[in-house]
């Protein structure tokens, strides 16, 4: 799993940092999202998906690893 974000769309409300503080923080300059770990371990996968689902601007995209990534 990988986490991708489009910071240009981020409103800086911080829902992601509240939902998954091990994965997301907010910039001290403008409050936009900062990804702390863009390849979360399996134990944080559910938190990453929850943060993506709760983001009001659909900023966070989860890219799932595929078994046949060489294709
Ligand atoms: S929840 Fe979405 S809009 Fe809010 S700070 Fe996080 S990425 Fe930005």
Image (spheres, rainbow, N blue to C red):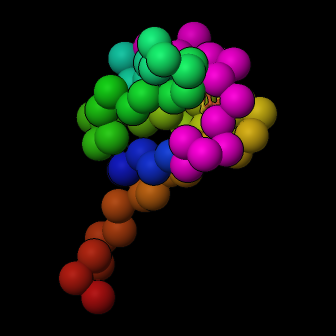
Q: Is residue 25 left or right of residue 13?
A: left
Q: Position of residue 36 (x, y in %)?
A: 32, 27
What's the residue at 37%, 17% (across, down)?
22
**With respect to residue 15, does 32 lie above or below?**
below
**With respect to residue 21, does 4 lie above or below?**
below
Q: Position of residue 4 (x, y in %)?
A: 45, 50
Residue stretch in magenta: 6-21
Q: Quadrant of residue 31?
A: top right
Q: Position of residue 51 (x, y in %)?
A: 59, 29
Image quadrant holding the C terminus, namely bottom left
Residue 22 is inside the magenta segment: no
* Residue in the foreground of this view, choosing between 18 and 42: 18
Q: Quadrant of residue 63?
A: bottom left
**With respect to residue 15, does 65 lie above or below?**
below
What's the residue at 62%, 17% (across, down)?
14
What's the residue at 67%, 44% (across, down)?
9
What's the residue at 35%, 61% (across, down)?
65
Determine if residue 44 is in view: no
Q: Position of residue 53 (x, y in %)?
A: 68, 37
């Amino acid at each position: 799993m990988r986490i991708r974000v489009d910071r240009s769309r981020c409103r800086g409300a911080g829902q992601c940092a509240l939902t998954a503080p091990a994965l997301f923080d907010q910039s001290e300059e403008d409050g936009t999202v900062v990804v702390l770990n863009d390849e979360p371990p399996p134990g944080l996968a559910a938190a990453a998906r929850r943060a993506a689902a709760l983001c009001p601007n659909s900023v966070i995209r989860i890219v799932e690893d595929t078994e046949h990534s060489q294709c």
